[in-house]
Amino acid sequence: MRIIAVTSQKGGSGKTTLSGHLAVAADRAGVGPVALIDTDPQGSLADWWNERENPSPAFVQTTIASLAEDLQHLKEQGIRLVVIDTPPAITRSIQAVVSKADLVVIPTRPSPHDLRAAGATVDLVERAGKPLIFVVNGATARARLTGEAAIALSQHGTVAPIVIHNRQDFAASMIDGRTVMEVSENGKSAEEVEKLWGYVESRVRRLPVKATFKAAALPKANFGRRITSHELHAEENTEPRYAG
């Protein structure tokens, strides 16, 4: 099982949108079973998932305290990929997520403020000894700043060669639990996301192979129920729920 953490110190970088889109792209590419985890207290990713008609990828409700145990449980159930969305701040919860990740994806908008904020995230990832990829996100087509942002980020780590541009279909898709691939399969946004996933997957495949495990059959009863808003904000000492 591989774990991808999508994180950035800067709010508004597009972490939630990118997390959902990468997970769906991976699932559509046949990588699954795929699971999503939302560690952001705002719960935006969970809210999006609860609007989905398609129960895949799976959604996992957990807490930072039980994250390691729940990831092991997912691995035993045969989940092949986990994508984790994180809060927009450098917190212990982000440190916990990064420590469990195989790869960290850092979405960064091409603006001076976002570029300056990327440094703290890079420091955290480097201290954990994890590989990272920058994704230039929310870019304006043919804007010079987009190229300048990629050059600046390349001083700190690998920059994905696929830029995600700012288009209305991204915001529209997140309203009803879909992705741009499900709204307009042949659109430019869908093409960018699919190419980005292809690149991310190629990077994941190059990572050292972990110890093998026997994948158990997925229990369908645990992967077909939506998580209510009440359940999402339940007290942290409740048992984690798995759905999808």
Image (cartoon, rainbow, N blue to C red):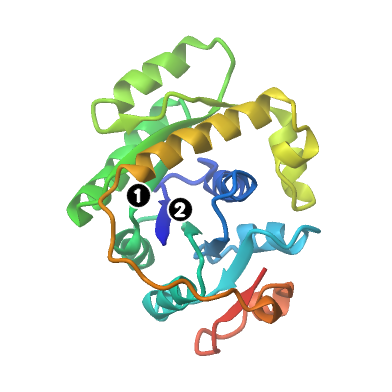
SS assignment at label 2: loop
Residue 88, labelled with which disc? Answer: 2
Circle 1 is placed at which residue position? 103
Residue at the location (30% across, 31% down)?
158
Q: Residue 140, how many percent across, how many down?
A: 58, 19
**Above or below for 132 versus 239:** above
The quarter of the picture where the C terminus appears is: bottom right
Q: For the residue marked with disc 1, what is the amino acid?
A: Leu
- Tell whether 85 sits left or right of 178: left
From the viewer's perspective, tell me whether residue 148 is left or right of residue 122: right
Quadrant into which the N terminus falls:
bottom left
> Which of the marked residues, 1 or 2, is nearer the chain's N terminus?
2
Neighbour tally class for label 2: few under 14, some 14-19, many 20 plus, Cα within 10 Å: some
**The residue under label 2 is which amino acid type?**
Pro
Q: Is residue 169 above or below residue 97?
A: above
Q: Nearer the viewer, residue 73 or 171?
A: 73
Q: Quadrant of residue 65?
A: bottom left
From the viewer's side, name the closer residue of 140 and 179: 179
Residue 85: x %, y % from top left: 50, 56
**From the viewer's perspective, is residue 225 above or below residue 13?**
below
Crowd rating for badge 1 (residues with CA inside 10 Å; few <14, some 14–19, many 20+): many
Query: Who's the residue at 78% across and 32% down the image?
Result: 184
